[in-house]
Amino acid sequence: MCMCRMEGRQTYSADGFRPTSRIWETLNKYDPEDDSWSDLEPKDPVPAPRDGHTMVVGGSSGEVILFGGIGSDDTPLGDTWAYAP
């Protein structure tokens, strides 16, 4: 799992490997004001499932940037994706 946080606001998580060795394809948001999690459904195309990725929130726009990781077939990934909440 990879997590990043916007200053004082929502926290985003993108899941990776689980103990079952399955890669999940989820993007979630935690809102501390409501103390609630929600599943996000980005529009296609979406990144391939992965683990070991890096995720940050980009500047004032608040885009969530995801980079790299290891794919479900153990292939290193070097792609970059942006999600605008």
Image (spheres, grey):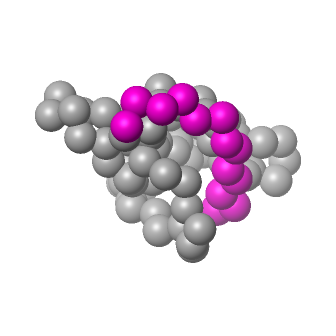
Seen from this angle, which residue lies furthest bottom? 43
Please state if 85 lies on the left or on the right of 49 as rendered. Answer: right
The verdict on residue 15 being magenta is: no
Dominant secondary structure, magenta: strand
Is residue 74 visible in this depiction of the protein? yes
Residue visible at 49% across and 51% down in the picture: 48
The verdict on residue 76 being magenta is: yes
Residue visible at 70% across and 44% down in the picture: 80
- Work out whether 4 lies above or below 46: above
Label tally: 0
Instruction: Please identify the quarter of the rendering in which residue 16 is found.
Output: top left
Residue visible at 31% across and 42% down in the picture: 23
- Give the residues drawn in magenta, as a range: 73-85
Residue 52 in the image, given as x and y percentages of width and height: 47, 26
- Work out whether 11 lies above or below 53: below
Residue 6 in the image, given as x and y percentages of width and height: 65, 40
Residue 21 in the image, given as x and y percentages of width and height: 22, 33
